[in-house]
Image: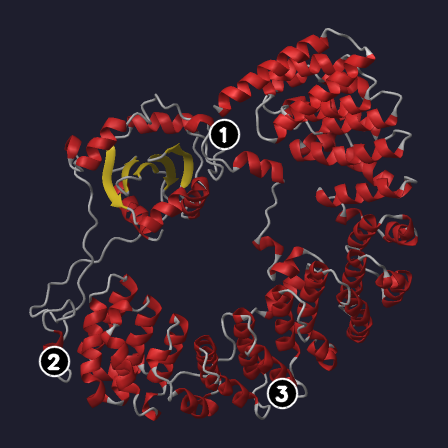
Amino acid sequence: MPGEKSRGEIGEIRTQLNALGASGSRPEAATAKKELFKKVINCMTIGIDMSSLFMQVMTAGMSNAEDVVLKKMLYLFICTYAQSNPDLTLLTINLLNKDCKDQDPTIRGLALRSLCSLRVANLIEYIVSPVSLALQDRNPYVRRTAVLGVLKIYNLDAAAVRNAGMLEDLHDMLQKDPDAQVVANCMSVLLETGSGQSLVTRALVISLLNRIKEFSEWAQCQVLEFAAHYRPSGEQEVYDFMNVLDDRLSHSNSAVVMATVKMFLHYTLSMPATHQQVLERIKDPLMTLLSRDHFETAFAVLCHFHLIAQRAPIIFSQIYTTFYCRINEPSYIKFLKLDILAAIADETNAYDIATELTEYVNDIDEKLARKAIRTVGKIALEVQDVPGLVERLLGFLDIGKDFVTAETIVQVKDLARKYPDIAEVCVGSVSNISLEDVEEPQARTAFIWILGEHGQTIQDAPYLLEACAQGFANEEAQVQLAMLSAVMKLFFKRPPECQQLLGATLAAAAAEPSQDVHDRALLYYRLLHHNVQEARRVVAAPVPPIARFAEEQSPEQRDRIFDELNTLAVVYRQPSSAFTTAAPSHKEEEEEGLIGAGGGIAVAAAAPVTAPAAAVDEGSSLLSHDEQQEAFFADPTANGAAPAVLPAPPPSAPAPAMDLLGLDDLLAGTSLAPTPAPQPQQPPPPPPLQLRPQPQLSPQVFQQKWGALTNTTKFQHSLSPSAMAFIEGNKHQDFCKKVTAANIAVMASGGAPPTYRFYFHSQRADRDTRILVESIVDKNKSAMQVTIKAEDSTSPEQFQRLYQNLLGGL
């Protein structure tokens, strides 16, 4: 067995460590210790827990204090298991503090780095003093390590760093330290802690830029990033800075070039004429970076090309051939080049670009061919006045490949939406296609939209839609929705031909399990039954031309990304706030798990409580509901409490009796058939429950209130497979975040398959009423048992409606 084998290996290593620990510091023992320590490190690397050997490793390693290699492995072992053995780690503090005063700067630096990497909050007081002393060390390596150690301490206890005055020390070192790498580390730490921007001064920026050649390439990037936070006092100062850094645009390192480009562009934003000259100046350095053989670097540079081209397309419009695809380029480079071609296309080059893209449509790579068609369509949307451009796009319909036809139909639909004056030409080319030849759902949706919107000019439009109506149940939901809308629009344009088609489509849609399809069919029928002219006004109203599609990136978002030039925001094409968090990475790791070791219940990270919620005991009265849970799923009315049921929604107003071209006869016996007798009007439902944001409640008070409250409501909610997957996904974090977004705080969550438990609490916005919730999920039965308790009698039922709506949206 693997477990028995690992335990046997650990026992053997322990015996050898004990023997070597007693052997002292003899040279032959040192060699044996190194080999044994390598074995320990190897076991750690493959995931075997070696923390039980903590004392033996310490004893064996301390006997050879002068061996640097042995110390490195000892420090690695200590840092790895420091968090899981905080009490034993305390015993290593004296060793590390002693080594921080060693004569050898290498050992001083290693000891200091290990001391700052323990990540045990209780030991901060033992770390601050050695780091403060090391900041004044005579050796630059020790000072570099100490500067980075300040950041590690800051992530554990920011107050300790501020109280010790370390940030002020870093600021002084930033100005006075002779070692360039120490200065670079100081900049990095100050920026990470949010203290760097306020310390940027003209004298400091000038000092750093004048000695920029002393820094390493990575440090140069940090200097340029640091200086980018400074705002020059006038145009002359901008010119002085750019003159100093002009040679950085010719640097061999692409990161230095991009950092310089960012600084130039940001410094000249308020100087339009100079900004235009800067764009012209940076064009050649960026093109040089593209000519290198590193595709990864080229991709990052092209991302910046794309962003700049969207802001100033005229700069690159004359060199558009540079962005033609090469046969040896990977697909991600080709796709990005097509995006750039679409961004820089204008009246002078659009036709040439479309001609080049036509060649890509016949490429063996289907994804590239699809992207080329979409690019031609995008260019036609932006530069519609170029003669022959639309014809290029429509010519793709004659190629005879199914995927080419599908992609082209989608682009033709967008053209017809934005430019109604050329819709007749586009529709004339599409009308010769049979719907049976279009298999992709998105293309079928676009084709059906064309038939419904321009069916008056397509002679066979009703008969093309009839074929789709016959297989209505086999279509995707998006195709079904498009079919409903198209048939309704075509009915108002050609009633005699579409009467039977409309009835059959509405009847088929009413029987669909998709709630969206069913509800739209019901809406259309009620509109028709109420008033035909009103239905025409709602469904077949004239559609204004599209100015900008929702999928397009807004200028405001592009400006936000431009502010974060030379970061991942440009590569991801979204602001950094969309994919980053402010919390340090190690804190995220500590908070991301909702379930503690051994399957116990741990406090949810998203719970906005002031006091730390301790793990809930499995044996407490709050969680000991296994028997009740099984009985509840077997009989929801057990324990004398019937599950609460939502009141039925009020019926719609009675419709006037009328028969729309025999439609009632066609729909007789379906769920859309009109009700013969009107129902009495029911009183309106009560207003929705409003909850207070970020309610505060400690675990102890939750436990007390749960046992004392008597106003209780229970119900069982069935979970779809997608809802069940959503609850289980990402260690329940996605579900907990969704609940928290509804102003329902997470007290605790966890469990082991097939049963999960969640405990929530909330507070009414209109009064100080507390609401407590227990949700028990049974995966085998795809159901959730919910118990709601509140401090008044009306809140449980109101909260039930809110909670069921939330669960229904999973």
> Residue 529 placed where, x, y %?
17, 77
Q: Quadrant of residue 636?
A: top left
* Scheme of colours in the image: secondary structure
Q: Is residue 104 above or below residue 504?
A: above
Of badges 1 and 2, nearer the viewer stands 2
**Above/below status of 198 relative to 286:** above
| Label placed on residue 351 | 3
| Figure quadrant of residue 344 | bottom right
Name the front one of labels 3 and 1.
3
Q: Are marks 3 and 1 in contact (CB under 8 Å)?
A: no
Q: Is residue 275 left or right of residue 401?
A: right
Residue at position x 49%, y 71% in the image: 550
Can you say whether 15 is above or below 385 in the image? above
In this view, the mark in front (3 or 2): 3
Q: Is residue 98 above or below residue 274?
A: above
Viewer-proximal residue among 568 and 550: 568
Q: CA distance from mark 3 to mark 1?
A: 66 Å
Residue beneath label 2, please?
Answer: 658
Element on which disc 3 rests: helix
Q: How many marks?
A: 3
Badge 2 crowding class, 10 Å Cα cut-off, few under 14, some 14 to 19, many 20 or more, is some
Query: Where is residue 801 shown, x and y percent of the image?
Result: 28, 48
What residue do we see at 64% from left, 76% from top? 341
Distance from the alpha carbon under mark 3 to that under mark 2: 56 Å
Residue depicted at 73% across the width and 32% down the height: 161
**Camera sees residue 530:** no
- Kind of residue at badge 2: Met
Q: Which residue is mark 1?
A: 611
x and y, in percent, of residue 681 in the image:
14, 63
Q: Nearer the viewer, residue 136 or 213?
A: 213
Report the residue at 68% width, 76% height from top. 324
